[in-house]
Amino acid sequence: MLALRLARGSHPLALMRRLLVAAASAGVGFLMLCTLGYASGHPAESAEATLRLLWCFVPLAATVQFAVAVARTDPSTRPHSGLSAVGLGPVRLAVLATISTAISCTLGSAVALLVFLHLRGDLTGLPFDGAAAGLLGADAPLPIAAVLVLLALVPVSAATASGLSLRARPVPDTGSSPDPAPQDPAPTAPTPPTGLPWGVALTTAGLAMEAYMSRGDGHTLLPLPGRLDATPVGVLVGWTLTAIGLAVAGPGLAYHCGRLLQAVRPGAVRLLAGRVLMNEARRIGAPLGVVCAVLSATVAAYALYGTEPRPLGPLTALGAVLVIGCTTATLLTSALEAKQDRARTTQELRQMGTPATALWAATTLRGVALLIVFVPLTWLVAELAALPLTA
């Protein structure tokens, strides 16, 4: 009940983020139910049905990542001295965030089930009854246990990941109960992330595997649920390694972007922009690397199939929209979390007389520095990934 009361009293933007999580959960649940419907209607093609289900884990992972980012930025789950006084410490707030995430995802799964049954023709009395009966295997009965298990995957995974992430989050200094005898420790430079060499190695290994395994036809080894039916399994494994490598390398690249801003006799604005970017590299670097990987795969897929009469199937298109939308929303939400964490520092700078134009200039410099590094990297990885397939 407390989780529901906190949800009702949240800011409209926080409620909108929860609704977006519910919508993403509904999309993933619908994809999984479509896979179950295909398996029920085609019992002789169990291998292809299993592959379709495996492909659903890509948007599932993107949705869980987005749900965790939304839970971390929820104002009602951030530690406050007033909440701690009534017994709502970091652990109980993490439990409340877990419950709120589970409720949002369960709502999305319920909507997915209703839409699936409606399009399948099991629910009547509304427009488009049974509009996709053939695609969803309406002639075969659905196993109830499998339906419940598939619909529970997103709520359970998202709630568990959110709870673990929030319990591991350090308690921010909100400034609501200042120390009567504050200390002024010497400022220390943020430690650089150590994943950059591993990320480069994984990205290189993924591109090399894709180039090697793309030789030959490799048809129907791991078909996508749609019209992309000639993708070798080695190429897909290579893309997966490349995406993991970019996510691992993202924090290191963002950290060095901050160092680059402070190079060659920087002024106050460049120093501020670089130091903030170095401090936030671990938080925004991984989502930025994931977005880079998704955009690289999109550009490579367009280079491979965009000029041919090979349209995507409806399920492939839905999965692509979920992955691109969730990863982009995760990056924006992580940037919002970083802004919330530095709110006290920004307030102190304003009280010291720092003009608002300087703060805006520092924010612009951070964005430009990230674009200068990640946009060419995205294009380079996309070209290297598509080159063996188009040669």
Image (cartoon, rainbow, N blue to C red):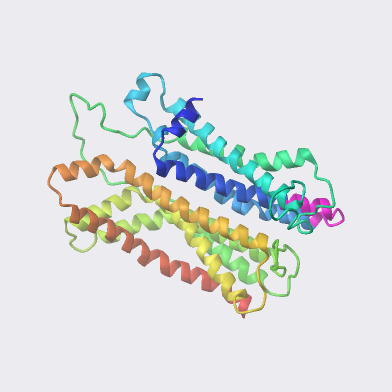
Quadrant position of residue 137: bottom right
Which residue does the image show at 35% across and 54% down from the upper left?
A: 255
Q: Is residue 203 left or right of residue 190?
A: right
- Give the vertical position of 214 relative to 107 (above or below): below
Q: Is residue 354 left or right of residue 107?
A: left
Q: Residue at x 19, y 30 (%)?
A: 183
242 vs 195, nearest the viewer: 242
Q: What range of the chain is rendered magenta? A: 34-47
Q: Is residue 229 magenta-colored? A: no
Q: Position of residue 217 (x, y in %)?
A: 73, 74
Q: Is residue 28 left or right of residue 245?
A: right
Tell me where residue 190 appears, x and y as whole percent.
31, 46
Between 142 and 117, the one nearer to me in the picture: 117
- Whether the magenta-drawn stretch holds residue 46 is answered as yes
Q: Position of residue 290 (x, y in %)?
A: 49, 56
Quick one: 47 or 323, which is closer to the camera?
323
| Figure check: 117 above or below 368 | above
Q: Is residue 385 at least partly visible in the picture?
A: no
